[in-house]
Amino acid sequence: MTKKLEDYNFFDEEVLECPFEFYRLARREAPIYQLPGTNIYLVTRHADIRAMLKDTDTFSSDFAHLLTGPTESDEVKALYAEAIEPANTLLTLDPPRHKVYRSLVNKVFSARRVEQMHDYIAQIVDELIDGFIDKGECEFIEAFASPLPLMVIADQLGIERELLPKFKMWSDSLAARLGQMATPEEQVGIAHAVMEYQEYILGVINARRRDPRDDMISDLANIEIDDGRKLNDAEVMSIVQQFLVAGNETTTSSLAGGLLSLIQDPAQMQLIRAEPERLDNMVEEVLRTETPSAGLWRVVTRDTEFNGVQLAKESLVMLRYHSANRDEAVFEDAESFDLCRRNADDHIAFGQGTHFCPGAMLARKEMKLAYSRLFARIDNIRLAPGKNDLTHWPNMVLRGLKCLHITFDEKAAPGT
């Protein structure tokens, strides 16, 4: 029996786990689709999403109020009442104010600075591979895909590596709250984690104000912005929080999802090993097919019409990057994973325009070095039998595998 759009519940974990048929149907029949019984419109076509991202006057990024979750209990609300109110800085701020904060982070992620990190990132990659290569198997996310970007961003922030397990827990909790799919019990744990994170970061901010170091938190805590004042605690905390989630969760998901795609398509794995010059394009194709930032909100600022659909003021728009990057109007044979795709970099995995991801160059650098060294040092990568269900974390905004157990052979050193 053929399904109709109304047969799908977009908020259902099963739909989010495998949304591709739903996306295809929406792109074909209702690319600006009002979810039944809500004021939420799902936007699924590449061209429409790009147009909305450019029109920041009509489609606002001021969606911080949506991140509280629809069903938080009194216990959870009481916990957050004691927390520092998040400041709108990057993700949830519109021009022209957005430019003030964006100019600060652009310096951190400049092309020159990212290129200078090449050898440093390569060293982390090899150290992580050293940690599991003798075993012939690993849970790839825990052993490699998660610690790599987490180490890089923690080092830049000035966080001791001994605290990485705690930071990973905080990052996962912040990501889960952003995704709005947590159970009531999980929401309590998330709230406690957010409070713990805030207490720790506030202490670091105050310490860096007194005794600055050569790290990003020191820079943010002491820099003067355009009106001659320093960023307050809530502003610094907001930027650090976004670095932590955006600079960690998304790269982890891309690395794991990309490796899975190669394992599932041996011809593509053989191709990238035989022609490593395709690695840049492979990274773009991984970003296109995985789209770890699966979607983001916008708020309609005025009554408007978009492609024949009436959108009332204060309606909510969910831009599904994950669907746009599989749009048949842009990508031929869009569902396939193709290292030779000529327009792979037409994806919008990093957004577009004003809110284009400032860490895009760093993410690409991490991914390229990671895959390059993995292919140089291990061979015959396979899924570990009986250990993978290949499911993703339930999340409205982010998309990432829960785990990826692999087995492999260590490659012999050249000349041996």
Image (spheres, rainbow, N blue to C red):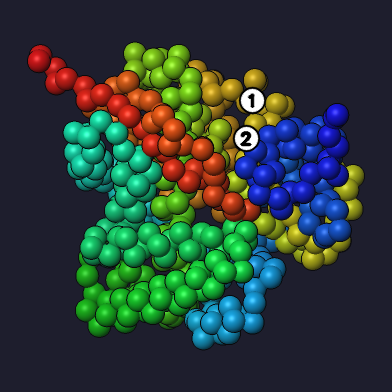
Residue at 63 percent of width and 53 percent of height:
396
Q: Which residue is drawn at 77% across and 48% down?
A: 9
Residue 5 makes an appearance in the image: yes
- Which of 135/63 is in front? 135
Residue at 17 percent of width and 20 percent of height: 412
Residue 416 x %, y %: 9, 15
Quadrant housing the N terminus: top right
Residue lying at the far front of the rendered structure: 386
Does dot 1 land on a helix, a strand or a loop?
Answer: loop
Q: What amino acid is labelled 1 in the image? A: Ala
Q: Is residue 174 above or below residue 413?
A: below
Identify whether 162 is placed above or below 206: above
Q: Which of 402 and 62 is in front in this view?
A: 402
What residue appears at the point 85 percent right and 30 percent down from the top-left corner? Answer: 2
Within 10 Å of disc 1 (Cα), the crowding (few <14, some 14-19, many 20+) is some
Instruction: Tell me: 343 left or right of 32.
Output: left
- The image quarter containing residue 347 is top right
**Cα–Cα gap, marks 1 and 2:** 8 Å
For mark 1, what is the residue?
A: 334
Circle on res. 217: none
Q: What residue type is labelled 2?
A: Asn
Q: In the rendered view, would you say 282 is above or below 44?
A: above
Question: Quarter-wise, where is residue 158 in the image?
Answer: bottom left
Residue 148 spot, x, y in % from top left:
31, 47
Q: Can residue 116 be seen in this view?
A: no
Residue 198 drawn at (x, y percent): 42, 76
| Circles 1 and 2 in contact, beta carbons < 8 Å | yes
Q: In screen coordinates, is 88 left or right of 126?
A: right
- The mark that comes first in sequence, 1 or 2, is 2
Could you say which disc has been placed on residue 325 in the image? 2
Compared with 307, 195 (above or below) is below
